[in-house]
Image (cartoon, helix red, strand yellow):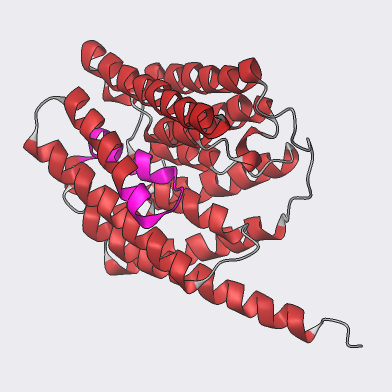
Amino acid sequence: MNSVIAKNETILSYIIAIALILLMVAASVILDDPEVILPEIAAMAIGIWVYREPGWIRQPSKIFVAPSITAAIGFAINQVDLPYLGKVSITLVLMMLFLRIIQSNFGPSLATGLLPLVTNAVEWSFMISVVMLSFIIMLGVLAFKWNDDLEKKVKIPYQYMLVFLILIFVWIGLCWIAGYPQLAVIPPILVVVYESLHKPMFNGKMAFKLGLVLTISAAVGTLLYFAIDSWVIVTLLDMILMLVLLRIVGMRIPAAYAFPLLPFVFPDEMVVMLPVGALIASTFLFGSVLLYKKWERKRSQLHAPRN
């Protein structure tokens, strides 16, 4: 009986989360304003309302505060007359400092901070959309008290913020040298990389599955974007296909729901490169996280006390 109730609750959660995502895209179409679409909101809606990720819902206020402030940081930096990768670098550092100050490691807030740089957001509708949608998602947690049984504060390994910055700066440098600076920032991948660094256990199988899922989600989103004119229909198909994909691989990856929405907001020259860019970025970044985690484990074993 309890399993049936839990299953029905999960189905209802999916329906409500996907409805919010569809409403966001529909609002963009009605207003003729792509800046209303926030791909990371799709990841947050699924990760918080459906998966109820403990690390994301532990402190509900951060669901609203962190994405709103990082979005403001990225939006403000985007108005400054600097080279693109310079803006990205400054925004990354400021976001890490901000998350450290508020004692949070809420990964999705990185995507909302980087998105205005990637899309060159200049309209205030972007900021309004971030604030409204993150507030709505936070209200869902508060209304159903999903965080009541969770410890409000846990130790955050802040050293991973520095590791993340170093890794991303290396990747940015490689993209710049290769002549593809636009591929330096694919927000959903950077969020998953950040989250992966914080996982106590990260192995080759996980790295492969993450890269596979994110590459497929990028390919699906891109193909449907070019094949079907209706953004709302494309979004609905994207969400259904991502649900099926994640069921097949047996993993919970909220970012997979964000990736297919990127073609709606990315510059045209980036959209056609998105699947290949996702594959290359995933291979390098998840491979680097895997190497770092292996080094970390060996280091801890060497320093472990011997009986």
Percent position of residue 89, x then y:
50, 51
Q: Quadrant of the C terminus?
A: bottom right
- Residue 197 visible to the viewer: yes
Residue 89 located left or right of residue 215: right
Residue in the image at 79% along x and 50% along y: 155
Percent position of residue 266, x then y:
26, 39
Residue in the image at 21% along x and 23% along y: 232
Which of 259/209 is in front?
A: 209
Placement of 271 over or under 167, stated as above or below: above
Q: Is residue 27 magenta?
A: no
Residue 104 located left or right of residue 27: right
Q: Which residue is most to the top? A: 30
Percent position of residue 139, x then y:
59, 17
Magenta segment: 245-267
Q: Is residue 266 magenta?
A: yes
Which of 239/94 is in front?
A: 239
